[in-house]
Image (cartoon, rainbow, N blue to C red):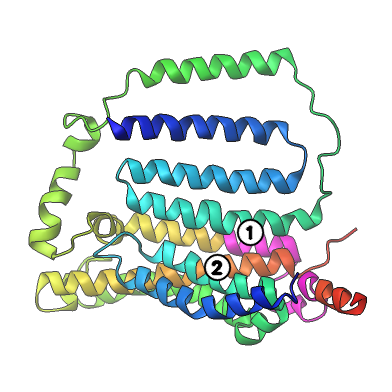
């Protein structure tokens, strides 16, 4: 019962954070709030006993993403340029989609239902085999690296390709080629602050 | 702010423990929550913290761009190469069973190697993205 109310609290916190993200104009505040959003989501995952997912969400979602957003802010002005206008059409479209999703959510199996489709396919085999056969207590790692090794290989290739792609898009070449020529922002800032001092 | 001694000393103290914690998450993935993805991000975070306080130049001295690029590719190579090795040892792609005599030892070994590959790639990509975002003047 406690878990239920903790979840209710955290999810309403998510709603409040989302509301402020929409309302606030200062981009730094929005970035900070999106970090807070990820952290709250990580807390929800912990509460649902999905510790591995929570770990990833906390490290990637609220850690690195926030830093990268802040770094990307350098290319942007500090505030949103013009007032967002709310049109009736988009509002009604959002409401309709939200209602459809909520309606569809009633058809989902209950949380922790042992007869849910996700729990009767291959999951029981993973859980039964993992410790007795392989002596690996954390089934998640076993599924990721062993049973679903191909998926994880694909994920790593996706991370690699995306990283290379973004770096080439931002810099116009690979890192090593053009990096030496341009002064970078962080060091530039420290120089100016020293000059001022 | 960056000349503030509190920030400088705290970041120096934290740098080592963050990396050790990342390695713990990396190699303890079979037993507790964590694995290559999280560990890569944590280790990258240590370097980013250092860069935020001491400037990008210092970090690029110990982790140059070229090294980052090689690590990025090396991770994928380790992961995919593990599969090739298992083929060469007479098994299916990414089947770890021929790596050791006992099945659970082979499984542990395979998972640790593969997770190492994941960790290397994620670490290098995260740090490379940070370099790319902060290291260039935006074109006007």
Q: Position of residue A113 (x, y in %)?
A: 20, 29
Q: Which label belongs to residue A67?
A: 1
Q: Residue furthest front?
A: B6
Read off the residue under disc 2: B45
Residue at the (68%, 18%) spot, across then down: A90
- Measured along the vertical axis of the image, is residue A173 above or below residue A24? below
| Chain of residue at mark 2 | B
- In this view, A67 is above or below B60: above
Residue pictured at 79% horizontal, 57% vertical: A74
Q: Does A49 lie within the magenta span?
A: no
On residue B37, which mark appears?
A: none
A91 left or right of B47 in image: right
Residue B112 occupies quadrant:
bottom left
Circle 2/circle 1 CB separation < 8 Å: yes
Q: What's the magenta bit mostly, secondary-structure-wise? A: helix
A132 left or right of A54?
A: left
Q: Nearer the viewer, residue A143 or B14?
A: B14
**Stretch of the chain drawn in magenta:** A162-187
Residue A186: within the magenta? yes
Structural crowding at the residue carrying mark 1, measured as other residues with C-alpha within 10 Å and reported as few (<14), some (14–19) or many (≥20) = many
Residue A105, position as x, y percentages in the image: 38, 21
């Amino acid at each position: 019962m406690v878990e239920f109310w903790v979840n209710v609290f955290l999810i309403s916190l998510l709603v409040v954070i989302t509301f402020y993200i929409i309302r606030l104009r200062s981009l730094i505040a929005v970035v900070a709030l999106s970090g807070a959003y990820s952290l709250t989501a990580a807390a929800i995952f912990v509460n649902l006993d999905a510790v591995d997912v929570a770990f990833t969400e906390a490290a990637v979602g609220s850690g690195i993403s926030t830093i990268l957003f802040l770094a990307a802010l350098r290319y942007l002005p500090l505030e949103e340029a013009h007032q967002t206008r709310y049109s009736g059409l988009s509002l009604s479209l959002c409401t309709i989609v939200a209602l459809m999703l909520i309606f569809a959510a009633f058809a989902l199996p209950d949380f922790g239902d042992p007869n849910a489709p996700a729990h009767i396919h291959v999951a029981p085999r993973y859980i039964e085999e993992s410790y007795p056969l392989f002596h690996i207590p954390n089934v998640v790692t076993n599924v990721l690296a062993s049973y679903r090794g191909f998926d994880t290989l694909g994920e790593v290739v996706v991370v690699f390709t995306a990283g290379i792609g973004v770096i080439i898009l931002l810099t116009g070449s690979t890192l090593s080629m053009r990096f030496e020529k341009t002064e970078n922002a962080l060091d530039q800032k420290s120089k100016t602050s020293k000059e001022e001092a | 702010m960056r000349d503030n001694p509190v920030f400088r000393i705290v970041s120096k103290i934290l740098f080592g423990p963050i990396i050790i914690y990342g390695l713990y998450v990396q190699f303890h993935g079979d037993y507790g929550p964590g694995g290559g993805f999280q560990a890569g991000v944590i280790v990258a975070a240590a370097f980013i913290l250092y860069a935020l306080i001491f400037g990008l130049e210092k970090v690029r001295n110990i982790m140059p761009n070229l090294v980052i690029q090689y690590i990025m590719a090396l991770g994928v190579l380790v992961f995919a190469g593990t599969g090739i090795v298992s083929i060469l040892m007479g098994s299916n792609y990414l089947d770890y069973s021929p790596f050791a005599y006992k099945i659970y030892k082979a499984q542990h070994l395979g998972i640790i190697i593969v997770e190492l590959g994941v960790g290397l790639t994620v670490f290098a990509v995260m740090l490379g993205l940070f370099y790319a975002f902060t290291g260039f003047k935006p074109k006007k």
